[in-house]
Every structure is written in structure tokens, then in C-alpha cells.
């Protein structure tokens, strides 16, 4: 190979290398430009003011009345690019002029699942100790209309829409509601009265409305309202906005209860520890008119509850059951369950699998001590 040939070959290799490098640089430059463009778009989005979600109250041609989350209402313009909107829709508006930018598709529920415990209970009547009279009354008022509505049609009467369970804490009110839901294969919707009282005007009432709408969709269902006294307390003339909002929510609850006739497959169970605080309107005939007292367990109830919570425990032969039952006379069903749990812990601490008499005696003493402390705190809170 001559010198010229070698030089030409070297030049060819150098040109090929430059060409490859140029191709790589162009590709890298293209990627960098795309990255810069994407970053610019991200910056522009970050600079764009956020849109506000509002509810449409009414529509007038190209204008609408919207309600802001704080309850204020405004008459605004609707963008021409916005799809057809109707009263009740959720829309996005710009924060400066509050003009409707576009319709926002949401689920029907007003985030209602956040406030509810929805389940299909598996608790049976046999797992509730004592309360035979209460069980029979609930079966008659709630279970029978859901299982045999034809009986009431033939007789020509409407069964009660709802019931009110009242009594001391821990006596089994929630258990009774879950047991009847299980026996009727109903959806159990549990809500707390205080959760229905919302911060902004009108939200509590809307939440109540959608809870009962959900109950109809999941029927047969049982709506269990715990601590109903937080919502349905006796009304007084007050000027605070918070009290007025509670009353609005309460009125919506009464309206929803009145909306059910006796043969509907949705039942309402209210629960309270303070029946004396309730407004008469909620317990009048046609609403929660069946009042069922759920008291502390009697001697037979204590025996049944104790057997239920110790059936899976290994018990020593030295236990004087009659003495234990007498010592637990003033305890609720929840307290008796706590006694069994604490007794098991005492056995575990002593590295035993068997729970003896001493364990239960110490457990009763501990639970009674905690109960007195809690009662003292509640007394000081109310009258201190």
C-alpha cells in the first residue's frame, strides 16, 4: 500500500469518526431541547393559578349561579368551550373572576365514604349475651319487616321506620344493630353524629342527603347513627353560625327519615347514652319512635357474656365463678370483655397458658379502677 493510499484511509477513518460524533451530538442536542421544552411547560403549569371547585346552583343561558366552598354564591359567566352544565354539577372556576372554565366529573357521593363504615356484619344473635327482651323487640321492629314485608301489606299497616337504642356505654347497642343487619343480610352503614356536623354551611345537610341516597342504593340496609345526641340535641334559640349549621343538618336528617315509608327496605337505628338530651322531634311517632333501653347486664346476662368471651380461653379449676359474677354486677358487657382480656394478660406475664382465679380478681379490680377514674374525669368535665 502506497503512502497516498494510507493517507486516504486515515482521512476516511477521521471523517467517519467526525460523522459519528456529529450524529451523536445532534441526538444529544435533540434530547436536551425536548427536556428544556418539557421543563418550560412544567414551569408554566406551576405559574398557572389553580382552579377552584364549586357547585352550580342554577343556570341562566350563558351564566350560572355558583356556590363556593365557604358558602358564598356568585352570578358568573360560563366559558363557551364548557360543555353543558346543569344545577347540581361540580365545575372548575378561575379564582380571579370566578368564571366557569369547565365541568368537573365527580362521583355521585360527596366523599361520603370517608365518613362511613360500610360492611356486611357477621355477628350473630348467639354472640350477644343477655338482652333477650331487646333482641326480641328489634327482631319484631327491624328484622320482620325486612324479611316478611308481605305480612304488613296484608294487614295494611306500616312498621316503624326506625328505632332508638339508649343506655349506658358498652352495653351492646352497636352489637344489636350489627346482629340484626347480619340476620337480614343487610348492608350496615355506621356513622357518628358528630361527623355529620361540617365546617362549611350546607355541607352537613348535603352529606346526610347522600348517606341516605347511598343507603337506598345498597338496600336492604341499616343506617346506624351512633352518638345521635351530637346532632339531634334539643334545639335552642342561639345566634352562632355553628349551632345554626347543626340545626340545618338536623332538619335534613328529619326530612330524610320522613322520606321513608314503613315498607322501604332501609331501616334507621339511632344510638345514644343521653336520651334526655334529644329533641322531641326525632322520637315522635313516624320517626325513631321505638325506644329500646339497653341497660347493664343482669346476673344471667353477666354469665352469658362471660362465657362468650372465655370460650376460647384455658381456665384453671380454682375459679369461683359465682364470686366473679357477683364482683362484676356493676360492669357493662364491654367491661366484662375487658376483664377477660386483662386476665389473659396477667397469665401471659406469668408465662402461663391457663388463666386462674387470681388473674380474674386482679383484672376485675383493674377494670373497676379504670372505670372510676373515667367516670371522675367525665364528672369534672361536666360540672368541674
Image (cartoon, helix red, strand yellow):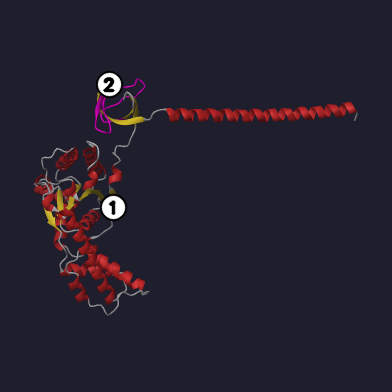
Work out whether 117 lies above or below 48: below
Residue 73: in magenta span:
yes
* Quadrant of the drawing holding the C terminus: bottom left
Indicate the secondary structure of the residue bearing disc 1.
Answer: loop
Mark 1 crowd level (few <14, some 14–19, many ≥20, 10 Å Cα): some
Location of residue 88 (image quadrant): top left
Q: Is residue 331 above or below residue 225?
A: below
Q: Measuring from the top left, give residue 45's x and y in whole percent.
A: 44, 29
Could you say which disc has been placed on residue 54 in the image?
none
Based on the displayed image, in which of its 4 quarters is residue 336 positioned? Answer: bottom left
Please name which of the two marks, 1 or 2, marks the residue nearer to the observer.
2
Sort mark 2 into few (<14), some (14-19) or many (20+) by Cα contacts within 10 Å.
Answer: some
**Is residue 381 on the magenta stretch?**
no
Q: Which residues are magenta?
A: 65-90
**Quarter location, residue 373:** bottom left
| Residue 116: % across, % down | 27, 47
**With respect to residue 12, does 360 lie above or below?**
below
* Residue 128 appears in view: no
* Image quarter in which the N terminus is found: top right
Residue highlighted by disc 2: 63
Q: Furthest residue to the right?
A: 2
Image location (x, y in percent) of residue 56: 27, 28
Marks 1,2: beta carbons within 8 A: no
At x 63% / y 29%, what residue is drawn? 27
- Judging by the rendered image, the residue that carries numbered circle 1 is 120
Of residues 311 and 242, the one nearer the viewer is 242
The overriding secondary structure of the stretch rendered in magenta is loop
Q: Is residue 72 visible?
A: yes
Q: Is residue 227 left or right of residue 313?
A: left
Disc 1/disc 2 C-alpha distance (Å): 46 Å
- Which residue corresponds to the image point at 28% horizontal and 52% vertical from the top-left? 120
Kindly state the secondary structure of the residue where label 2 is placed.
Answer: strand
Amino acid at each position: 500500500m502506497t503512502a497516498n493510499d494510507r493517507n486516504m484511509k486515515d482521512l476516511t477513518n477521521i471523517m467517519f469518526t467526525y460523522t459519528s460524533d456529529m450524529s451523536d451530538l445532534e441526538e444529544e442536542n435533540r434530547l436536551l431541547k425536548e427536556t428544556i421544552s418539557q421543563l418550560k411547560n412544567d414551569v408554566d403549569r406551576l405559574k398557572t393559578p389553580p382552579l377552584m371547585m364549586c357547585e352550580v346552583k342554577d343556570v341562566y343561558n350563558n351564566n350560572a349561579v355558583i356556590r363556593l366552598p365557604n358558602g358564598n354564591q356568585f352570578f358568573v359567566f360560563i366559558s363557551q368551550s364548557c360543555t353543558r352544565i346543569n344545577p347540581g354539577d361540580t365545575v372548575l372556576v378561575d379564582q380571579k373572576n370566578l368564571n366557569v372554565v369547565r365541568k368537573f366529573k365527580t362521583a355521585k357521593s360527596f366523599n361520603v365514604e370517608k365518613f362511613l363504615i360500610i360492611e356486611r356484619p357477621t355477628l350473630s344473635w348467639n354472640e350477644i349475651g343477655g338482652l333477650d327482651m331487646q333482641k326480641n323487640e328489634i327482631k319484631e321492629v327491624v328484622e320482620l319487616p325486612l324479611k316478611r314485608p308481605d305480612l304488613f301489606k296484608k294487614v295494611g299497616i306500616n312498621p316503624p321506620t326506625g328505632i332508638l337504642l339508649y343506655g349506658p356505654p358498652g352495653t351492646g347497642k352497636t352489637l344489636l344493630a350489627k346482629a340484626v343487619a347480619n340476620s337480614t343480610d343487610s348492608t350496615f352503614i355506621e356513622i357518628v353524629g358528630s361527623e355529620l356536623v361540617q365546617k362549611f354551611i350546607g355541607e352537613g345537610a348535603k352529606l346526610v342527603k347522600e348517606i341516605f341516597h347511598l343507603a337506598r342504593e345498597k338496600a336492604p340496609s341499616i343506617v346506624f347513627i351512633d352518638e345521635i345526641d351530637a346532632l339531634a340535641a334539643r334545639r335552642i334559640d342561639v345566634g352562632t353560625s355553628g349551632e345554626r349549621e347543626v340545626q340545618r343538618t338536623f332538619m335534613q336528617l328529619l326530612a330524610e327519615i320522613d322520606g321513608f315509608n314503613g315498607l322501604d327496605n332501609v331501616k334507621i337505628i339511632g344510638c345514644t347514652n343521653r336520651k334526655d338530651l334529644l329533641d322531641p322531634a326525632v322520637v315522635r311517632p313516624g320517626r325513631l319512635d321505638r325506644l329500646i333501653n339497653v341497660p347493664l347486664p343482669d346476673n344471667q346476662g353477666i354469665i352469658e357474656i362471660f362465657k362468650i368471651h372465655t370460650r376460647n380461653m384455658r381456665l384453671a379449676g380454682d375459679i369461683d365463678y359465682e364470686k366473679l359474677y357477683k364482683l362484676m354486677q356493676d360492669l357493662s358487657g364491654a367491661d366484662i370483655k375487658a376483664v377477660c382480656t386483662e386476665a389473659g394478660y396477667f397469665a401471659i406475664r406469668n408465662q402461663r397458658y391457663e388463666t386462674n382465679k387470681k388473674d380474674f380478681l386482679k383484672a376485675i379490680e383493674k377494670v373497676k379502677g379504670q372505670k372510676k377514674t373515667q367516670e371522675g374525669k367525665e364528672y369534672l368535665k361536666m360540672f368541674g
